[in-house]
Image (tube, rainbow, N blue to C red):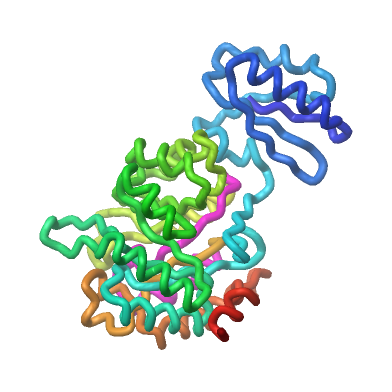
Amino acid sequence: MIIVMKPNATPNQISQVLQRIEESGFRAHISRGEERTIIGVIGDERHLDPDQWNVLEGVERTMRVLRPYKLASREFHQENTVIEVGDVRIGGDQIAIMAGPCSVESREQILETARAVKEAGAVILRGGAFKPRTSPYSFQGLGEEGLKLLAEAREETGLLVVTEVMSPDQVPLVAHYADILQIGARNMQNYPLLRAVGEVDKPVLLKRGMSSTIEELLLAAEYILSRGNYNVMLCERGIRTFERATRNTFDINAIPVLKELTHLPVIADPSHGVGLWQHVIPVARGAIAAGADGLLIEVHPDPAKAWSDGAQSLTPENFARLVAEVRRVAEAVGRSVAEPTDAQTATVAA
């Protein structure tokens, strides 16, 4: 249920509503807009009578959220959520580009890639330290050593770091090194993991499962939001269909649909979406035209020798071309690509 406060509601009136919610055994989430404060009532609201809340001072009206996902719904929070990570804003007018290798392989590889993507225009470095692989014999990642290398790359370049966490017990470790925690497609419905990242003070990048619907993605986000972490961004990374010409089918429809249904930022991953490097740039352009708030791009200094996903990885030169082309599309739709911040530039200069 949503409680909409009057434009002139006083802080005391809002506090009284919050107290009433807690006394009734529910939790409250406050969303403050330019004109109104909206309070979400979190819990099993089946036995709640909205009319009982309309009599409270300062309350304009109450309404039930019809969607099965409540906190993620645009009904609950009409304005776009903007996630601030360091000096980078995700979900606003600017488009944030995240780039780096599928897997952290060595110190030289991750530092070379970080320097290259930073120079081309990325503001966030991606790289896998823990890798969920279909085959148990495939490279599974360097683990904590990979996390330390990502932290070193951040120290040198000033780039923020996003990396995957695979299990609840890994959350404290990964959160210690990373700026953004990624939930991979295979773990989208790993509910203990979703609850665990919902209880840490780090933004979460939630990838859509390879066979999951948009509603299932939003309900997975709801698990995180319901635990108190409201800094969630959604990632469209392609779904599994009957088509075999590409690795996955990039669901570009999902981007405008998600922007309509939810206030959460939407990130596009065209690298996994198509799985073939030569198609990544045009799909990235299409994703930005469709309304994506950011891109997640795989980049490797020598894709032919990559330990994982070399076929979908761009060279640094091709990544620079992608950024240049995406900038033109962004300008055409009234947006811009986020540039490295003063703090990031100062780190590199030092």
Please identify the dominant SS of the magenta region: helix
Q: Quadrant of the C terminus?
A: bottom right
Numbered label tally = 0
Residue 32 occupies quadrant: top right
Residue 110 position, x and y percent, is 35, 76
Residue 26 position, x and y percent, is 59, 21
In the depicted view, which residue is nearer to us: 115 or 185? 115
Residue 200 position, x and y percent, is 48, 44
Image point 23% across, 69% down: which residue?
308
Find the magenta span and give its range.
Answer: 261-290
Residue 5 occupies quadrant: top right
Image point 43% across, 44% down: which residue?
197
Q: Quadrant of the N terminus?
A: top right
Q: Is residue 158 left or right of residue 127?
A: right
Image point 25% across, 67% down: which residue?
245
Residue 255 position, x and y percent, is 50, 56
Tell me, yes or no, if residue 48 can be seen here.
yes
Residue farthest along the left direction in this orientation: 137
| Position above or below: 235 against 187 | below
Residue 111 occupies quadrant: bottom left
In magenta stretch: residue 51: no
Residue farthest along the right direction in this orientation: 8
Q: Is residue 174 left or right of residue 55?
A: left
| Position above or below: 311 against 11 | below
Image point 63% across, 28% down: which residue?
28
In the depicted view, which residue is nearer to us: 136 or 38? 136
Q: Is residue 267 left or right of residue 79?
A: left
Tell me, yes or no, if residue 283 can be seen here.
no
| Position above or below: 335 against 49 | below
